[in-house]
Image: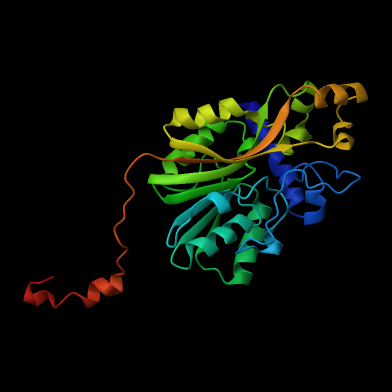
Amino acid sequence: MNTKEQELKDIVKERYSKIAEQGKAENASSCCGATTPSNKVYNIMMDDYSKTEGYVEDADLGLGCGLPTAFAQIKKGDTVIDLGSGAGNDCFVARHETGTEGKVIGVDFTPIMIEKARTNAEKLGYNNVEFREGDIDNMPVNENVADVIVSNCVLNLVPNKQKVIGEIFRVLKPGGHFSISDIVLVGNLPEALKQDAEMYAGCVAGAIQKEDYMQHIKNQGFQNITIQKEKPIRIPDDILSKYLSEDAINSFNNSGFGIFSITVYAEKPGAKSDKPKVKLSELQDSCCEPSSGCC
């Protein structure tokens, strides 16, 4: 990892450590929770989770830009990994879908987020949800583990997005898939926004061109790549005014430039195993005494 990438990671880790101690209202009124709240109440990025089954209000910090779990086609018994799991909300929604027979793993590199998520899981009594501290571009997970991977407004925060997508490919089982909500750009971001560290932590400056984002996924070898949902994101003028003059704001708003939240689906090639899971107790019950030679 080069020095610039490490600096950006440190900025994000520091900012999201502070976010973990803020309330949801503060986070929702700013850009991915990372900037000083606007004077008006804006839900700039996030979608409403409150009517989603499995939703846990204490675990919702208002940091997402989509509802990837709603599109992820999670089945009972699946192993699901959530990248950038925060306080655990998407993991708990995924756990509702995968059931008690499945498993959910959250990965986050911010220690205080991991602590909050574990506390929430313990309060709920969820024994099949675990949280691992680590970078999503170097996941603390073995290869071919996940049936499904989800992530909500996180890949844009990682400097080396191609490396993360490679990790997703490694960790998914053959035939597994991901559904990821993220921020992408169409057109050029003003230099003042691009260079600002706070805006990087706020999802926007770390986003890349939509075309490049989709190409990274294709280059890794994924198939059946689909945009499941797309919505435009508008940064309010009173946030832009921290970075741009009035004339520059007008120019920016009329430039045809676009910031979009997209939810992307793709599959790892290979045949998914449909073999039924056999419990050890069932195996033992069907087995006779070794001396009889049938085992």
Q: Nearer the viewer, residue 47 or 242?
A: 47
Q: x%, y% of residue 272? A: 34, 49
Task: From the viewer's perspective, tell me whether residue 141 is left or right of residue 49.
Answer: left
Residue depicted at 30% across the width and 62% down the height: 276
Task: From the viewer's perspective, tell me whether residue 132 is left or right of residue 245.
Answer: left
Q: Is residue 172 above or below residue 278?
A: above
Q: Quadrant of residue 112?
A: bottom right
Q: In which quarter of the image is residue 50?
A: bottom right
Quarter occupied by the N terminus: top right
Q: x%, y% of residue 205? A: 72, 30
Residue depicted at 56% across the width and 43% down the height: 180
Q: x%, y% of residue 43? A: 78, 47
Which residue is the extreme one toward the left? 292
Q: x%, y% of residue 227? A: 55, 38
Q: Can residue 1 be seen in this view?
A: no
Task: From the viewer's perspective, tell me whether residue 193 is left or right of residue 295.
Answer: right
**Number of numbered tags placed on the structure image:** 0
Q: In this view, does 293 lie above or below 256?
A: below
